[in-house]
Amino acid sequence: MKIIFIYLISLPMIIFGDESGGLSFLNIPTSGNSASLGNTITADLYRPTSLLQNPANIWQNSQHTFSISKRSAITQTNYLNGFYGLKIRDLTFCLGVVQYGVNKIEEYDTEANFQGYFNFQNWAIALGTSKRMSGMLFGIGVSHITQNFTQISYNKENFLGLDIGVTVMDLLYRNNNVILTVSYVNKIMFDIPDFQQVNSATSNNILGIKTLFRQNSISLSIFSDLLFNANSKMVNMRAGLQPQINFKNNVLTNAGINIGLNKLPLYWTDDDIFNDDFIEYSRKLSIGGYLEIMLPVINQNMLINYAYENHKVLPASQYVSIQFSI
Amino acid sequence: MIDFIDNFRSFNSDSTFLEIDLNTDVETIGVPSVRVASALTLFDTTLHEISHTFNVVDNNKIRLNLDQLLNNEKDGLYKITLMFNYFSDTSSIPFQRYYLLDRTSPDIYQFSPFPGQKSDGSGQDITVNDTLGLYITDGPVYFDIQGVIYPDSGTFPIDLTYIFDNQKTIQYGLSINNNNFAFQADSFMVDSSLNGHYSIDNNLYQSNLINQSGDLSYAFTIRDKAGNSNNIDVLFYLVLNQNSANAHFFNYPNPFSPRNSEITNFRYTLLKDTEWGKLFIFDSNGDLVYLYQLKEYELSSGTHNILWDGNSIYGSKLANGVYFSIIEFPKNKTRFNKIAVIN
């Protein structure tokens, strides 16, 4: 089993796509929590919203988990997602739907004449499973992605995404004050029906580490990712910080403040581009928080996340997520 | 002495008759005949001759119907030869002239910047500091001391520059919000590829345009020596406010296909010179995929285009999708623009 995983994980390191930037809506943080923690792959550990980040991390304690998230950002763009996680013994299954659209795109001809407006739409339906074995999580996620322009001539495109991940849940075994989690994911994308690989993102290999320091009812989590782009031999970093309090309360059980950095370029072979401007305009800073509430009558756990993401020149984005666990 | 009464050498379908004054009675010099041949085939053994008809207007004048003679012929240089067969004697004294059949109207095939059209129907932005460039084409031939150049057929090696030239005339009127304020007549030359360039510096009309904004229209009439002309009106929007100019940052064509070697133009307008500028392109997640530092000549007051071939900074063509561009200047950020890539 482990040999198969190692083989699959190493596959994207040797198969390169020849294009960049397409289907990048899959990289949009799938929750307010993730957005405010730099979109690190361990930010939504044990939540179904991890499905598109690292399917290994969808493993959950609750039997049922529902999540819905919305991003409000750039004018005339919309982003919405919903995830459902189901736990059966040591297996967790997850179904997710993501919709991204851009409206009122201006069409111009070659002589700068306005021709009208057109729209753009992405959909992704993802299925994933995660299995817990010997303190490790093994996950695999498959997604079907469609891409379409309307009001102009365009043939709808279809893609198949394959994400394979592994997470070591507690490297410092039986240390109650420090919990170290290491997560790794590889992402591959193919077009349909040709099954040629496309490079869907600026990164396709991600190593994430979450370190949780706990003292009584207060804890601090540090999240960090290293992103490797096999195409450009580029390394980026993402990071998040989350101080949180565990309340001895029947209603409000947990609350936290999140700070995130997404992303910080660390290394690139192209010295002409890799300069201060490139670093400055690559990063987004975010702040947010979460409240975890136990709904008294129906005895359900509800998690509310919010994130505000800022960039030097891009319009700010806001994320809101609500998650129910039974 | 034989005179060609009409002094034109270039003609089109409108100038159909060529009158020749023989200055003597036809009876005394013999039977006139006219041969019209394409000058291009001068050295061709199968010299193309056109059967002709002409009228003797009176005893000493003949009139050629050029339109009838050359109705099915291509535009180009023709040699008209007048010969007289003196009764039974077949010898003659040819009298010949070159004429240019030109039925091609001069045309403006490109503007810089393009007037274009905004979504509200007005023209694209232009400033007082812009120079409007016109790229004009006109056929059929170019005259050079080395010969007459036919772009499609080669060079006819005879210097006719003492008769013909490559000059065209242009007239233009300017109006702001339908109020005419300038009218100018000028000329320009075409080059050996039959292309010409003419530019209008808006600064010349600064006194008329200062503190003005709105529809700025140019009405052009371009004419060649054969009498062919073309009227072309273009509409711009004279912009006075930087915020208004920023609101119309856009790229054309949109969508475009990098994989098919298409290039898109990012067009922006500056009302004052600026120290620096940066163009950014982001994907839908806000990840930077392209970064360009504007050059010094792209920072001056006026309307500018930045060309982009769709290559990302990662060295590959961008995939299908929607991307976002922003141009940043000191204390000045242009609008968020949506770029569509469809390969």
Image (tube, coloured by chain):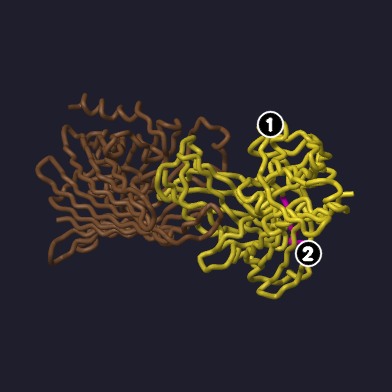
Chain colours: A brown, B yellow
Q: Is residue A249 left or right of residue B311?
A: left
Q: Image point 22% across, 60% down: which residue?
A: A302
Position of residue B233 relative to residue B323, above or below, is: below
x, y (%) of residue B213?
66, 71
Q: Residue furthest right?
A: B1
The x, y position of residue B227, in whole percent, is 72, 58
Q: Which residue is mark 1?
A: B44
Q: Position of A145 compared to B243: left or right?
A: left
Q: In the orientation shown, which residue stands out farthest toward the top?
A: A3
Foreground residue among A58 and B265: B265
Q: Nearer the viewer, residue B132 or B49?
A: B49
Which residue is at the front of the view, A180 or B256? B256
Disc 1 packing (10 Å; few <14; some 14–19; many ≥20)? few
Q: Which residues are magenta?
A: B197-206
Q: Does the rendering let one see residue B181?
A: yes
Is A67 in the magenta?
no
Q: Is residue A12 above or below residue A85?
A: above
Identify the element where label 1 is drawn. loop
Query: Is residue B205 rendered magenta in the image?
Result: yes
Residue under numbered circle 2: B184
The answer for which chain carries disc 1 is: B
**Residue at image x 20%, y 26%?**
A2
Q: Quadrant of residue B169?
A: bottom right
Amino acid type, label 1: Asp
Q: Which residue is painted at 18% across and 64% down in the image?
A: A295
Estimate the x, y position of residue A28 in percent, counting from the top left.
Answer: 36, 50
Answer with the quarter of the image where residue A212 lies: top left
